[in-house]
Image (cartoon, grey):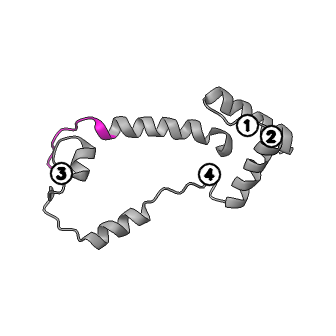
């Protein structure tokens, strides 16, 4: 299912991320108010905590997006080859993702 729905799910998550990180939040006792993206990228020390550049770089490396669809490169490669071999169309929305999923089940006899 992941191979068929990954683009559709990624688009939905991206839209949510943009909305979530660009709307204003109210100030609370736990932190400042403002727009999350702006607060995150401000070079000021908003919370009175000093963080060294090495720690920031380690966090960025640790949080890097894993492009693997299934967490298993062999499985990803298998399904990508099946899509190419059977000339299946990559999905662009929920309906085409459903179509691809059903075609993959039929073609690879799962």
Q: Position of residue 40 (x, y in %)?
A: 25, 51
Structural distance between the alpha carbons of marks 3 and 1: 45 Å
Structural distance between the alpha carbons of marks 1 and 2: 6 Å
Disc 2 to disc 3: CB gap under 8 Å: no
The range drawn in magenta is: 21-29
Disc 3 to disc 1: CB gap under 8 Å: no
Camera-nearest label, 3 or 1: 1
Structural distance between the alpha carbons of marks 2 and 4: 17 Å
Structural distance between the alpha carbons of marks 1 and 4: 14 Å
Q: Which residue has dot 2 on it? A: 105
Q: Secondary structure at mark 4?
A: loop
Q: Is 54 in the magenta? A: no
Q: Mark 2 or mark 4: name the one nearer the start of the chain.
A: 4
Q: Mark 2 or mark 3: name the one nearer the start of the chain.
A: 3
Camera-nearest label, 2 or 3: 2
Above or below residue 72? Residue 16 is above
Residue 69, numbered circle? 4
Q: Secondary structure at mark 2?
A: helix
Q: Which residue has dot 3 on it? A: 30
């Amino acid at each position: 299912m992941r191979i068929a729905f990954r683009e559709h799910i990624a688009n939905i998550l991206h839209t949510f991320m943009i909305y979530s990180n660009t709307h204003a939040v109210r100030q609370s006792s736990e932190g400042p108010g403002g727009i999350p993206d702006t607060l995150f990228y401000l070079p000021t020390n908003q919370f009175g905590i000093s963080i060294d550049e090495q720690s920031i770089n380690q966090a960025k490396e640790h949080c890097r997006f894993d492009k693997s669809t299934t967490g298993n490169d062999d499985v990803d490669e298998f399904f990508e080859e099946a899509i190419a071999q059977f000339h299946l169309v990559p999905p662009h929305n929920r309906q085409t993702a459903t179509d691809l999923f059903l075609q993959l089940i039929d073609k690879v006899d799962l």
